[in-house]
Image (cartoon, helix red, strand yellow):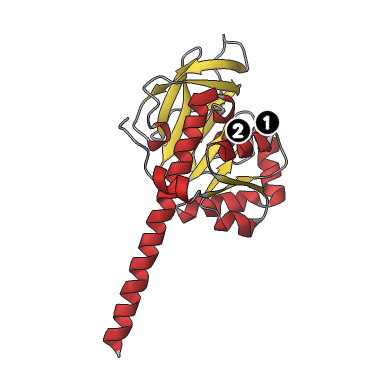
Amino acid sequence: MGSGSPGATDAEANPPTIAVLDYGIGNLRSAEKALEHVGAVAVLTADADEIAQADAVVLPGVGAFGRCREALAKTGLDEAALNAVASGRPFLGICVGMQLLYDSSEESPGIAGLGVFAGTVRRLQPGVKQPQMQWNQLSLMNDSPLFEGLGENPWMYFVHSFAAEPSQYLLATCEYGGSVVAAAQSELVFATQFHPEKSGQAGLAVLRNFVNIAASSREARAQRAAQQAQLAQQAQRRAV
């Protein structure tokens, strides 16, 4: 997985602001407090302007897919979430927040997800106790800064009866009556089926890595903006 997390120094000196989407379902403050614990300026918010100004966005979720999706729509935070993804800022979906990033879920037929990841969320395989409510060990399938420094098989805490189907976004799996998708990634959109805020030091390390990703992304955007401004000034001088 490599050594050292990108943006770590900048994250400590100038902590990024991370918006935790407040759509009224579940213990959203647990994610907010865990992010604060690892050095972020975390803000639990339903304000679209505040979300648009944040360096990164987190979408937690517990309960039923359909109820969470309807709550997102009712608060207008579905649009805020999609705008954050489209902006290229780091985005993290947790548990049902991960599932909401997909097209749909067997749990709530006829209710469309956010469609950031193509695919369907499906019920866990028959023959196992549902929900999976336990610590389980990850198998990391691809390198990612989200798991920087965690080794190949960290333990995380799960509470779920549904999981995304395998796809090109696959980042990690766990074993529970077969292989279960535990994490996914597409560019700077990350998603975990496990709860990092409930997963002890390993989970906090995941969140700390996300904070570092947010700091690195903010720095890269600032550099691009400065370069564009410089090019615009040069173009104006040539035009005179």
User: Cβ–Cβ below 8 Å for labels 2 and 1?
Assistant: yes
Q: Decide which of 233, 81 is in the foreground and name it.
A: 233
For residue 88, side relative to residue 234 (left or right): right
Q: Position of residue 55 (x, y in %)?
A: 51, 52
Secondary structure under the numbered disc 2 in the rendered image: helix
The disc placed on residue 215 is none
Image point 68% across, 45% down: which residue?
22
Mark-to-mark CA distance, 2 and 1 = 8 Å
Quadrant hosting residue 234: bottom left
Q: Position of residue 139 (x, y in %)?
A: 40, 21
Q: Quadrant of the N terminus?
A: top left
Which badge, 2 or 1, is on the more N-terminal residue? 1
Image point 56% across, 39% down: which residue?
35
Image point 69% across, 34% down: which residue?
27
Identified by mark 1, the residue type is Ala
Q: Is residue 187 visible?
A: no
User: Which class describes the residues within 10 Å of circle 1: few (<14), some (14-19), or many (20+)?
Assistant: some
Quadrant hosting residue 111: top right
Q: Nearer the viewer, mark 2 or mark 1?
A: 2
Q: Position of residue 158 (x, y in %)?
A: 57, 21
Q: Is residue 121 visible?
A: yes
Image point 59% across, 17% down: which residue?
132
**Which residue appears farthest toward the bottom when viewing the image?**
240
For residue 95, side relative to residue 228 (left or right): right
User: To which residue does mark 1 refer?
Assistant: 64
User: To which residue does mark 2 refer?
Assistant: 96
Q: Position of residue 71 (x, y in %)?
A: 71, 43
